[in-house]
Image (cartoon, grey):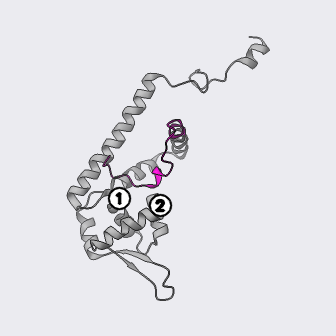
Amino acid sequence: MTSTQAVHQAPQDESGTPAGAPAEPDVARSVIRQLRVIIRALQGHSRSVERACGISASQLWALWELQRTPGLNVSDLSRRLSVHASTTSNLLDKLEHRGLIERRRPEKDQRIVRLYVTDAGLELLERAPAAPQGELNRALQSLPKGRLVELDQGLDLLVEAMNTTEPKAGLQPFDGKS
């Protein structure tokens, strides 16, 4: 091969496929099947959570987080759930209405609100299955860091290629109702 040919040859990935070339149909189908397995597992678990507990999987995950770390504020809980603070506030309103959590304000600074699971919330947690997002989070955290970074980058490319019109969809909890 001449140097002129080498300069004009497209870069290749590890499989020898030109970089940027569309994925092979069998690989794309495999990815679709794997995504379906993940989504269906989340949906099935969400339905079982609602049947067993009477609350959504997102609400259950919030309870688990508050039990693990009593006294979180809304911002801290939002980060742990990977949702927007307003979404967390709405979720907490529902839990508080059911008597499963309580909001407390320290006497020193009334602007700060701390969140705690009530006795009724603790009783619910004793009989509840694990929240599906918590399980997904656990599975992702168990991956080697390099693989998790690769997965994140690949999913970024997929979301970008989908030209989604809902850029904030990732800040809404998944309750498996779709």
Instruction: Indicate which label's residue lies in the foreground, 1 or 2.
Output: 2
- Quarter of the figure with residue 119: bottom left
The residue labelled by disc 2 is 84
* Mark 1 Cα-neighbour bin, 10 Å: few <14, some 14–19, many ≥20: many
The residue labelled by disc 1 is 58
Identity, as a three-letter code, of the amino acid under mark 1: Ser
- Left or right, residue 8 beside residue 37: right
Spatial CA distance of label 1 from label 2 is 13 Å
Q: Which residue lies furthest to the bottom in this view?
A: 107
Q: Choose the circle earlier in sequence order: 1 or 2.
A: 1
- In the image, is residue 21 above or below residue 87? above
Rendering coords of residue 135 (x, y %): 36, 52
Quarter of the figure with the N terminus: top right
Q: Is residue 150 magenta?
A: no
Q: Main secondary structure of the magenta part?
A: loop
Rendering coords of residue 18 (x, y %): 61, 22
Is residue 91 in view?
A: yes
- In the image, is residue 85 above or below residue 8? below
- Quarter of the figure with residue 149: top right
Identity, as a three-letter code, of the amino acid under mark 2: His
The structure residue drawn at horizontal position 51% and vertical position 48%, both measured from the top left corner, is 167
Residue extent of the magenta highlight: 157-178
- Left or right, residue 41 beside residue 141: left
Element under disc 1: helix
